[in-house]
Image: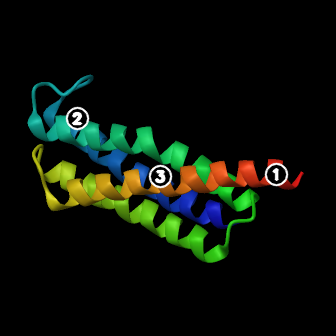
Amino acid sequence: MITGLYAALCALLLLALSGRVVALRRRLRVGIGDGGDPALARAIRAQANAIEYIPLLLVMLLIAENNGAGVLLLHACGIALVAARVLHAVGLSASAGTSFGRFWGTLGTWGLLLVLGGQVAWGYIAARLVG
């Protein structure tokens, strides 16, 4: 299952982002919230942003796979998902403002929402027309 590969890679990314939050909390002795520390606030947002987007994109990737989407499309979307989320996390972790990683990570994520959303919707429509 192709989606499983990208789910595993996203899980590793989320683990890395979570580990960063925990390490900063321990170093700064902040139990909850960000304690007013900008680096911790960015780390928390990078983790939360990944949690906000990754599940829906993986669900849509799995639906596309189950609908018979091509292997090339599935891998392209999976690679783009991981790359976009890494870019965004790195960009947001480095700066609260505009950055290369944050811009392209966001654009890539939104592009995937559009591509996979379109593919899943088309799969549904096509199944209704044929069935």
Query: In which quarter of the view is residue 66 placed?
Result: bottom right
Would you place residue 29 above or below residue 126 in this image? above
Q: Earlier in the sequence, mark 1 or mark 3?
A: 3
| Label 1 to label 3: alpha-carbon separation | 22 Å
Q: Tell me whether circle 3 and circle 2 mark residues in contact (CB < 8 Å).
A: no
Left or right: 99 in relation to 73:
left
Residue position marked by numbered label 2 in the rendering: 25
| Label 3 to label 2: alpha-carbon separation | 36 Å
Residue in the picture at 51% in, 65% down = 77
Q: Earlier in the sequence, mark 2 or mark 1?
A: 2
Query: In the rendering, at what x and y percent does residue 53 appear?
Result: 44, 43
Name the foreground residue: 91 vs 65: 65
Query: In the rendering, at what x and y percent does residue 72 appear?
Result: 60, 77
Q: State the SS at label 3.
A: helix
Residue position marked by numbered label 3 in the rendering: 114
Number of residues whose C-alpha sits closer than 10 Å to that of mark 1, classed few (under 14), some (14–19) or many (20 or more): few
